Image: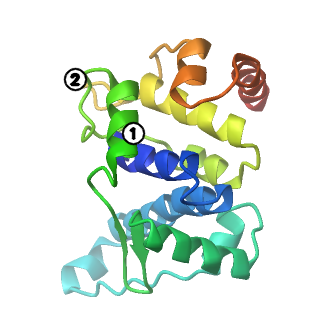
Amino acid sequence: AITPIKLLNGVSAYSSGTISFKALRVYLSCFELEAIREAAKRSNKAKAKQGSDLVCFRKEELISLTGGLSLRSIGKSLKELETASLMYFSKERILFTETPINKTSRELIEETLSGRKGTRSIPVPRRLIKLLGGLTKPALFLTLIGYILRGLSIDRRTGVVNPRGTVKASWIAEAFSLSLRAVRSARTELVSLG
């Protein structure tokens, strides 16, 4: 689960030119990297009980998660992300900023959430995070973020991911400074991807 604040901090930093689109892809791929470690911990409960909590995050793993970015690009992107105060990456841990990073980020959060809590957890499937990390088209990336923010929730009774939210293409275009044509084209591409 990822909070809207974390997602929109990255989008805001990209929109303002603080980070590159490659850095935004690396940022989302770090969520996948963290999710992989959490899944490993859950599946290996015996070692967790013994206190063997050795976790090692490697930049090389981000190559496949970002669709083949070079190690140099990944290193540069991680520096951009740290400079923008979005996250901290080391071999031992990844720390994401939990609060809005600046005024622009706060405004984007207020505009896009319209009354919803920015700290609520959005159940983003790992396959979707991996898809985001590998996308090379900013319009497609931002459109998918819009659908994630408005369309995914957890059913409180069953705990199952509910993908039944709705969102207008015009809202995505306005919220993320895209053309309506780009959003519609991205939606068509997402439908074709399944």
> Tag 2: residue type?
Arg
> In this orientation, does residue 44 appear?
yes
- Numbered circle sitting on residue 57: none
Q: Earlier in the sequence, mark 2 or mark 1?
A: 1
Query: Is 102 displayed left or right of 24 in the figure?
Result: left
Residue drawn 40% across the image and 35% down it: 108
Image quarter of the C terminus: top right
Residue 7 place in picture, x, y as percent: 44, 46
Q: Is residue 190 above or below residue 123?
A: above
Q: Who's the residue at 55% across and 12% down the image?
A: 168
Q: Residue at label 1?
A: 123
Mark toward the viewer: 2 or 1: 1
What percent of the width, then of the height, locates residue 57?
A: 48, 80
Viewer-side residue, 193 vs 2: 2
Q: Say which quarter of the image contains residue 47.
A: bottom left
Q: Residue at x 43, y 84 (%)?
A: 90
Q: CA distance from mark 2 to mark 1?
A: 15 Å
What label sits on residue 157 in the rendered view?
Answer: 2
Amino acid at circle 1 = Pro
- Within 10 Å of disc 2 (Cα), the crowding (few <14, some 14-19, many 20+) is few
Q: Secondary structure at mark 1?
A: loop
Q: Residues within 10 Å of mark 1 (few under 14, many from 20)?
A: some
| Residue 116, placed above or below residue 50 | above
Image quarter of residue 158: top left
Residue 109 occupies which quadrant of the picture? top left
Residue at 48%, 65% (x, y): give it.
36
Secondary element type, mark 2: loop
Which of 99 and 4 lies nearest the eye of the viewer? 99
Give coordinates of residue 144: x percent, y percent: 60, 33
